Amino acid sequence: MKEMIYFDNASITMFKPGDSYNRIDRCLKECSSLGAGPNTTSMNAKRLIEESREKMNHLFNNNEDWDAFFGPSISFFVNRLFSLFLKKGSHIITTQIENDIVKEKLQSLSEAGLIEISYLPMSHEGNIDLQSLKASFRENTTLVYTSFVSGVNGAVIPVRDISNICKERSIPFAVDASLISGVLPVDLSESKIDILLTDCSRNLFSLNGLSCCFLKKELGFSDKFFSSEEENLSLPSLASLSGGLDYIKTKGIYNINNHLSKLVEVFVQNLIDIENIELLSGDKNIPIVSLKIDNPVNIASKLDENYGIMVSSGMFGESGAHRMLGIYPEGSIRFSFCALNTVNEIISATKILKELIQ
Amino acid sequence: MKEMIYFDNASITMFKPGDSYNRIDRCLKECSSLGAGPNTTSMNAKRLIEESREKMNHLFNNNEDWDAFFGPSISFFVNRLFSLFLKKGSHIITTQIENDIVKEKLQSLSEAGLIEISYLPMSHEGNIDLQSLKASFRENTTLVYTSFVSGVNGAVIPVRDISNICKERSIPFAVDASLISGVLPVDLSESKIDILLTDCSRNLFSLNGLSCCFLKKELGFSDKFFSSEEENLSLPSLASLSGGLDYIKTKGIYNINNHLSKLVEVFVQNLIDIENIELLSGDKNIPIVSLKIDNPVNIASKLDENYGIMVSSGMFGESGAHRMLGIYPEGSIRFSFCALNTVNEIISATKILKELIQ
């Protein structure tokens, strides 16, 4: 089935592991929709959703303090969260590297005069000056929202420190963990995060159209507000997620991370001395490396058309992170890996890339 | 593959026609996500969406006066529409038979003191007193919203008359055509409908998680507001829709409707003289017939467990229509057909039903 080298896993994983395809097939034969019946086919759909929710709770070590909801997208949950937490006159603290969907949403609320925004400056490595974070809180601060990881260089944001600071002030803290889920362990029961969002189609291996929101029960929001889209969820995506979560459990997330780190290491080693390429890699444990390079979109398109190597290029919805790195509007090429990628693929791709550049 | 008799097609079609399953399979191998890349796999996703949009425009005879957007659900579009058209102090005219999702959404806006609602009374056959409609308009009326068809007895609402009345007053008119799409021709170019919504997973044969909104261009709303979820669409659903639309085109919608009407006719004939069953069938062209019967949920569950016959039962999200018909809170059993159902299935099911009742 696999004929290409697919390195765009931070957008979505193209290939799904374990018996995910069999599960998708079975789902097509057995499940109708949560909104149907009630009858056997709708109960099969219900079982698929509940089984997937249970596996998500297990992976994120949810000790029942959070409700887990599925929805069609991060932006669906972001819209709900913002409408809950950002009333007229509210103040939100966020970073400059949130993706364009979140940034534009906040921008439009701010331009309508409804909310105030503080953007925290940060270093390329994802470091945030905690003093400046503390100084950012105002009387009308109602939410702190950050990604866990930069979508361009994989830099990890100090979520634990931020969560401590938010907790001291009793301000809800929401985190988009899409790019770290299935890559590094996230232990909710040990965390002070109030809301954790994750797109399930990256290293959790669902098909697209599926995200999950862990919402701390003590926030006291009605289930219905968040679960209202569960009737319409893409069931093949849930089947694929269920297969992905079993795969992660069987392999072990530490083993998966070792493998991903190895891929990053080989990739970086092979390109570090190449002229005309600047490597943007914020953390060796995060399988996202972008290249600052001339004509990124053009190079990416040659990799695709001539060699079947799939990457992201240009701005790929991350104009904030590119600005931070000083490469706006040129953008970059992003290579992002998943557990199914191999060292041999990295060797082939870096060899081709060197030939293209030199 | 088919081992059951599936008569819950007004909730979602379980079996997909033509080469839909091959298309789903191909989509899993070739398409990543609109939000990826750009690369071959994301362009494949884009092509799938655009091809599906073109086929939808063809089926609904959209002469380019409407934009067609895909989204994850009717409720996604309803939320967007209501936030666009229902500002504080707005008045909406709707019917008493809208499904519970729409009804509850309006109710909560009304209870928050934000909007006023007029519910149009109607007969079991879907007739609306046009004089009372005309008298319902107020100075602050900003939207008229109705379904095309009752979800309980298939009664057809006089959408053409309503649209004429709205047009005279320049009030936007939105219609949920989910239960008529793929069943009877809908010709947008001949209509005065401003907004047409349809769930694609009924007789258009997508998997779930896919709806479409036709939005009249002259309303002047930004594309982005509606297209923002297209990145996250379930691609297997689009592949399935694309196969379904080809099937409808090949068969011809009039031939499909003839077949569906035949199924309704045989179903009704076989049950019309049975004691203890009252048939709720509002229109012979709409393949939805419900039964007023004692213990509907219990009978439905026997049909399912003992005979593999899948139906909807109870309230199935249609409390308004059940109230109208005087069977709230008992509800009914709904039999709903699609083009893949056969006369033999109807004969088997009605025979079993008679044995169960008598």
Image (cartoon, coloured by chain):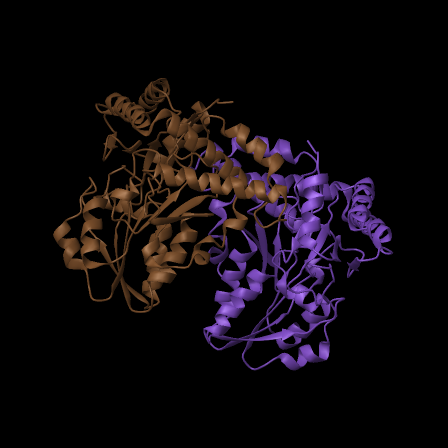
Chain colours: A brown, B purple
Which residue is pictured at 30% across the width and 65% down the height? A115
Which residue is pictured at 59% across the width and 39% down the height? A31
The quarter of the picture where residue A84 lies is bottom left
Q: Residue B53, position in %: x, y?
A: 60, 47
Q: Residue A201, position in %: x, y?
A: 43, 38
Q: Residue B191, position in %: x, y?
A: 69, 63
Residue at the left extreme? A131
Q: Is residue A325 left or right of residue B348?
A: left
Q: Quadrant of the C terminus of chain A?
A: top left
Q: From the viewer's side, name the closer residue of B185 and A38.
A: A38
Q: Residue A270, position in %: x, y?
A: 26, 21
Q: Is residue A62 left or right of residue A123?
A: right
Q: From the viewer's side, name the closer residue of B256 and B113.
A: B113
Note whether residue A190 is visible. Answer: yes
Badge count: 0
Give the answer, above or below, for where A191 lies relative to A310. below
Give the answer, above or below, for where B121 lies relative to B15. below
Q: Is residue B341 left or right of residue A242?
A: right
The quarter of the picture where residue A189 lies is top left
